[in-house]
Amino acid sequence: MMQSLMLAIYPLFKSEFHLNFAQIGLITLTFQFTASLLQPAVGFYTDRHPKPFSLSLGMACTFGGLLLLALATTFPGVLLAAALVGTGSSVFHPESSRVARMASGGRHGLAQSIFQVGGNAGTSAGPLLAAWFVLPNGQRSIAWVSLAALLAMIVLTGVGRWYRHHQRQPKKAAAAAPAPLPRRQVALTLAVLVALMFSKFLYLASINSYLIFYLLHQFGIDTQQAQYHLFYFLFAVALGTLLGGPIGDRIGRRQVIWVSILGIAPFTLALPYVGLEASAVLTAIIGFMLASAFPAMVVYAQELIPGRVGTISGLFYGIAFGLGGIGAAALGQFADLWGIVTIYKVCSFLPLIGLLAVFLPDLHPAAGHAAEPEPTNCEQPT
């Protein structure tokens, strides 16, 4: 919520500090740089040195960033605030993903899905908070929003105590892990997953950022009606995120990845050529199927490289944030050159990258039941 709030109040900063679009882009770059590129490094470090209270530390960075946003009087102050909010995200996500896995009781996909649905709900709420509270009351009202970060710090301190206690408990014997794959195959599999992430998040960026403009241009409807179509899509995304993990627990994550990315190709290819009602149905189907892939991908990668939960979580969340921001900016440039309809026709081929999923090894050939609970996943990897 707090991250998307910062992006939603760009108009306030633009008028308050008389910024041009290049400076607005620099704010986004600063935020995305710290929110994306730092996450793998943080995860790599905490895999070796678990930090139970880094969750509240990350939220403290966000708290400081929001307070600075409320009080900033210069453009460099806004950039520093954006960097702090992004840093808070980088510190929070790798360890929070580890805690979700620790608390899963073996149902790793379900835990990852619930965790991500919280993020989806907050992302949706940020613009509403901006429209209903911050924009009408001005820059200083952001300080009131920072109280949410302060409350989160208190809650996460309690989570950190649970995390530390869980680490100190006697370790139970874990189920025998499958033999690790050869390093070359692991590298190839990670490369395939990154390519699939590129397909998924670039197509999501085309819908999230430009669906309303596409509907206005293609069908001549009003903005309010187009907002309803975007809501249908976002609701389907939340539902797909929630169900993608447990479905992967049940039938296998490789199968979910296959279906959720390559399986939407017929729908994306048809979307630019159908009417308004069919467009609403297709975007809902696409949103549901595409969103179900991310929880499965994260848990699949965690199982691919055991003992590197923080590194993998940081890498995948960093890629997700980075591709979302860069993709939206690049598609906007292309839309100015070639038109919004052309962009949707070109992006409709992105899910065909899902054919690369044929190179994903089946890590659990006997999938069909939930994994056994693991002790804490905090042991040093051997």
Image (tube, rainbow, N blue to C red):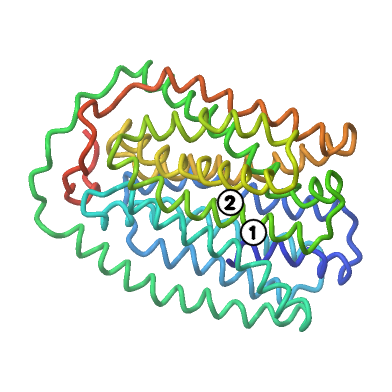
Q: Amino acid at mark 1?
A: Phe
The percent position of residue 224, horizontal first and vertical second, equals 78, 64
Can see residue 270? yes
The percent position of residue 117, horizontal first and vertical second, equals 46, 58
Point out which mark residue 35 bears. 2
Res. 265 image quadrant: top right
Relative to 146, is 10 on the left or the right?
right
Residue 106 vertical position relative to residue 62 in the rendered view, above or below:
above
Q: Amino acid at mark 2?
A: Ala
Can see residue 44? no
Quadrant in which the C terminus appears? top left
Q: SS of the residue at dot 2?
A: helix
Of callouts 2 and 1, which one flags the residue occurring earlier in the amino acid sequence? 2
Quadrant in which the N terminus appears? bottom right
- Please name which of the two marks, 2 or 1, marks the residue nearer to the observer: 1
Mark 2 → mark 1, Cα distance in angstroms: 26 Å
Q: State the residue at coordinates (26%, 49%).
A: 107
Residue 135 vertical position relative to residue 283 in the rendered view, above or below:
below
Residue nearer the viewer, 112 or 259: 259
Q: State the residue at coordinates (34%, 38%).
A: 302
Circle 2 packing at 10 Å, graded few (<14), some (14-19), many (20+), is: many
Q: Which residue is mark 1?
A: 231
The percent position of residue 252, horizontal first and vertical second, equals 31, 34
Circle 1 packing at 10 Å, graded few (<14), some (14-19), many (20+), is: some
Q: State the residue at coordinates (51%, 69%).
A: 60
Residue nearer the viewer, 28 or 272: 272
Instruction: Count all numbered tags in the image, as a single digit.
Output: 2
